[in-house]
Image (spheres, helix red, strand yellow):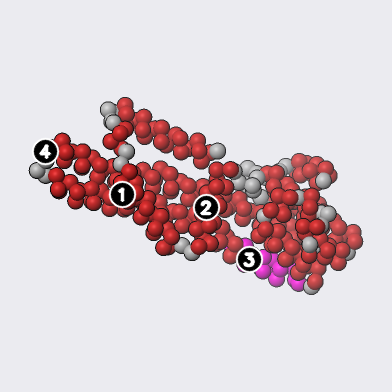
């Protein structure tokens, strides 16, 4: 929603200012300039990035429009899930959770949290380390180091789409200049056809420069920053799981272990202590 609101404000501000200054909107409609700039941008994007990154950019772009699933409600479900797993392990023994972590889709615990089940990478992260806990006697610092290494790797993967889009934002002003230069080359053919024809051709060429700079700094660049923020919120879920699992391996009670996880969450989406407690009890 914020992406749409911000885009409308950018477009309305620039276009309204242009019109009030006496500009003609029809002059800005230059389909050939659009084809040159955005066709070249798309081609360079495909050249620069592997297929999985291209798919991730599309997915993350759609996610920005629909809203990130990593909100307060998601975090509360995540902490509640961890509490149930830790509580069962504490009361019935570590071996009792093997069935849950081997088949989370059919687990009575995991099935109560469909949002977690949909996040396949996070689900794998949780089950992998619960499996390590149940099958071995790894020292707390060794487990924490292993989890930090995986989180670092995951951070790189999550930030890849934002970096790819940011590169295109940086390239768009240059591609706008390419379109403008080609427009000037065409204008050279009209030197004998009068000032009106030359003026329209030069204006069309300058529109290319405008479009490249406008789209790069007004839309594509800010979109890459929004993707970075979304990646950070997703990464916080991994850090939350890490803090909670390390705490429970260190001997903390389930309620205290998820408190360690809660403290790892960003303050604007972190549930209050009593709010989380009530949510855990409701589940």
Q: What element carries label 1?
A: helix
> Predominant secondary structure in magenta?
helix
Magenta region, residue range: 138-152
> Does 7 sit above or below residue 117?
above
Work out whether 165 lies above or below 97: above
Which residue, given by chain and number where applicable, does mark 2 sit on?
58
Q: Name the residue under label 4.
A: 194
Whichever of labels 1 and 3 marks the residue nearer the N terminus, that label is 3
Picture residue at 74% right of the left edge, 50% below the top: 114
Please report the residue visible at 81 percent of the width from the left and 57 percent of the height from the top.
Answer: 107
Depth-wise, is mark 1 or mark 4 nearer the camera? 4
Say which label, 2 or 1, has the lower sequence index.
Answer: 2
Tell me where residue 269 appears, x and y as whole percent.
Answer: 65, 44
Q: Alpha-carbon distance for marks 1 and 4?
A: 26 Å
In this view, the mark in front (1 or 3)? 1
Instruction: State the SS at label 4.
Output: loop
According to the picture, the residue beneath numbered tag 3 turns out to be 150
Image height check: is 74 above or below 122? above
The tag earlier along the polypeptide, 1 or 4, is 1
Which residue is nearer to you in this view: 233 or 179? 179
According to the image, label 1 marks what residue?
A: 176
Mark nearer the viewer, 2 or 1: 2
Q: Residues within 10 Å of mark 1 (few under 14, many from 20)?
A: many
Taking 55 as reference, is 38 left or right? left
Dot 2 or dot 3: first in sequence order is: 2
């Amino acid at each position: 929603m914020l992406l749409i609101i911000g885009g409308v404000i950018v477009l309305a501000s620039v276009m309204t200012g242009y019109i009030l200054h006496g500009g003609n909107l029809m002059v800005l409609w230059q389909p050939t300039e659009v084809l040159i700039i955005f066709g070249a941008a798309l081609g360079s994007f495909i050249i620069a990035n592997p297929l999985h990154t291209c798919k991730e950019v599309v997915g993350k772009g759609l996610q920005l429009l629909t809203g990130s699933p990593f909100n307060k409600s998601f975090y509360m479900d995540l902490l509640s899930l961890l509490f149930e797993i830790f509580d069962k392990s504490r009361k019935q023994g570590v071996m009792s959770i093997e069935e849950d972590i081997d088949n989370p889709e059919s687990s009575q615990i995991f099935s109560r949290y469909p949002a977690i089940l949909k996040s396949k990478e996070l689900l794998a992260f949780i089950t992998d380390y619960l499996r390590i806990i149940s099958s071995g006697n790894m020292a707390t610092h060794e487990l924490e180091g292993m989890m930090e290494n995986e989180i670092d790797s995951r951070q790189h993967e999550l930030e890849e789409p934002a970096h790819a889009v940011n590169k295109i934002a940086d390239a768009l002003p240059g591609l706008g200049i390419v379109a403008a230069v080609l427009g000037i080359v065409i204008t050279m053919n009209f030197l004998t056809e009068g000032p009106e024809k030359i003026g329209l051709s030069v204006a069309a060429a300058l529109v290319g420069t405008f479009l490249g700079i406008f789209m790069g700094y007004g839309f594509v660049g800010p979109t890459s920053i929004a993707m970075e923020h979304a990646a950070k919120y997703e990464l916080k879920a991994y850090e939350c799981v890490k803090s909670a699992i390390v705490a429970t391996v260190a001997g903390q009670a389930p309620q205290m272990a998820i408190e360690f996880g809660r403290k790892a969450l960003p303050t604007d989406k972190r549930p209050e202590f009593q709010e989380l407690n009530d949510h855990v009890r409701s589940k």
